[in-house]
């Protein structure tokens, strides 16, 4: 399978002079087209930093990142923001939404920025996505009038508006109760089954067990990897056990 993202010996450091420290210490990682991967590791190990490096959100100090045959390390700020906006989707633990806009307007806002003329089409697409994730009736609600799980569904709709090639999720279920988390993971599984690659940063073995490859990171280095068959809705307990055993084995 073709690789959609290749990170080659990425070094990312923070701090200056004596205080400088490599948070990513020559990490090589890839994501294939349509693949569902997770990144796990202790707090502070560099998971989010890796996600921001692979998505071109943050520049790297050394090494390179190639997305869909384009060297992101050589792209301009404008090119990068264009690639992120049109080909990548982002879902965070707390969706950042504007308080003065309703749910529908929050979902369509990023797509409207460069495409004001197509408001009818954009709104139609948003409604299709909202129906799909079960929040149709919430479109006029204020963002403070919905549950955390509903808000996250809206965040997923927003991330899917431009039909991205990959979705990056940083602890997307971290703020949800276990039932909502499971429902959000069902949505991610469906999106992935339709061909969108997904990379999730997570602490949760139940979340990672839904994916097909887990990269384990410690102190800025990928120390191990676990491959699982594509999740087909069965044997989740067995998969979680496999993930937790691997975590124990490598001391994470
Ligand atoms: N902008 C920054 N400036 C300075 N240090 C940073 C910055 N961003 C991250 N770090 C440091 O880099 C290290 C890795 O951070 P990162 O957020 O990637 O870890 P993580 O594995 O995602 O952690 P967590 O699970 O707690 O979210 C941490 O020690 C963090 O303090």
Image: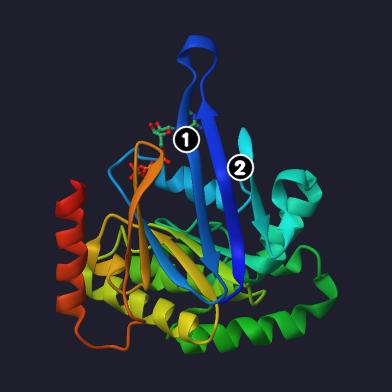
Q: Position of residue 130 (x, y in %)?
A: 51, 83
The residue furthest right is 117
How packed mark 1 is, by other alpha carbons closer than 10 Å (few <14, some 14-19, many 20 or more), is some
* Tag of residue 206: none
User: For residue 228, which quarter of the picture?
Assistant: bottom left
Residue in the image at 54% along x and 11% along y:
17
126 to the left or right of 188: right
Which sits earlier in the primary sequence, circle 2 or circle 1?
1
Q: Position of residue 245 (x, y in %)?
A: 14, 61
The residue furthest top is 18
Ligand 1 contact, mark 2 (Cβ < 8 Å): no
Residue in the image at 14% along x and 69% along y:
241
To which residue does mark 1 refer? Answer: 25
138 to the left or right of 244: right
Q: Position of residue 198 (x, y in %)?
A: 48, 69
212 to the left or right of 14: left
Position of residue 231 relative to residue 45, above or below, is: below
Pick the quarter of the image with the N terminus. Answer: bottom right
Residue in the image at 25% along x and 60% along y:
204
Position of residue 186 relative to residue 6, above or below, is: below
Alpha carbon distance from label 2 to label 1: 15 Å
Q: Is residue 194 visible?
A: yes
Position of residue 131 relative to residue 154, above or below, is: below
Look at the numbered disc 1 and give the secondary structure of its residue.
strand
To which residue does mark 2 refer? Answer: 58
Q: Is residue 147 visible?
A: no
How packed mark 2 is, by other alpha carbons closer than 10 Å (few <14, some 14-19, many 20 or more), is some
Image quadrant of ligand 1? top left
Residue in the image at 40% along x and 41% along y:
221
Q: Label 1 near label 2: C-beta < 8 Å? A: no
């Amino acid at each position: 399978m073709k690789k959609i993202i290749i990170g080659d010996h990425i070094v990312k450091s923070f701090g200056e002079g004596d205080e400088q420290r490599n948070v990513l210490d020559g990490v090589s990682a890839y994501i294939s087209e349509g693949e569902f991967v997770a990144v796990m590791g202790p707090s502070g190990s560099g998971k989010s930093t890796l996600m921001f490096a692979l998505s071109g959100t943050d520049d790297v100090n050394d090494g390179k990142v190639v997305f869909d045959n384009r060297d992101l390390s050589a792209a301009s700020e404008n090119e990068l923001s264009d690639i992120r906006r049109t080909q990548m989707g982002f879902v965070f633990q707390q969706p950042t939404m504007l308080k003065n806009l309703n749910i529908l307007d929050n979902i369509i806002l990023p797509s409207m920025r460069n495409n004001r003329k197509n408001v009818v089409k954009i709104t139609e697409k948003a409604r299709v996505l909202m129906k799909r994730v079960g929040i149709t009736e919430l479109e006029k609600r204020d963002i403070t009038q919905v549950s955390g799980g509903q808000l996250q569904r809206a965040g997923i709709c927003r991330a899917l508006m431009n039909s991205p090639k990959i979705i990056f999720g940083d602890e997307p279920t971290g703020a949800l109760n276990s039932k909502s988390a499971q429902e959000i993971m069902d949505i991610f599984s469906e999106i992935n089954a339709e061909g969108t690659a997904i990379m999730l940063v997570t602490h949760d073995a139940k979340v990672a067990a839904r994916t097909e490859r887990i990269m384990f990171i410690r102190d800025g280095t990928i120390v191990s990897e676990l491959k699982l068959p594509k999740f087909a809705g069965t044997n989740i307990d067995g998969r979680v056990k496999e993930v937790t055993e691997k975590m124990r084995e490598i001391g994470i």
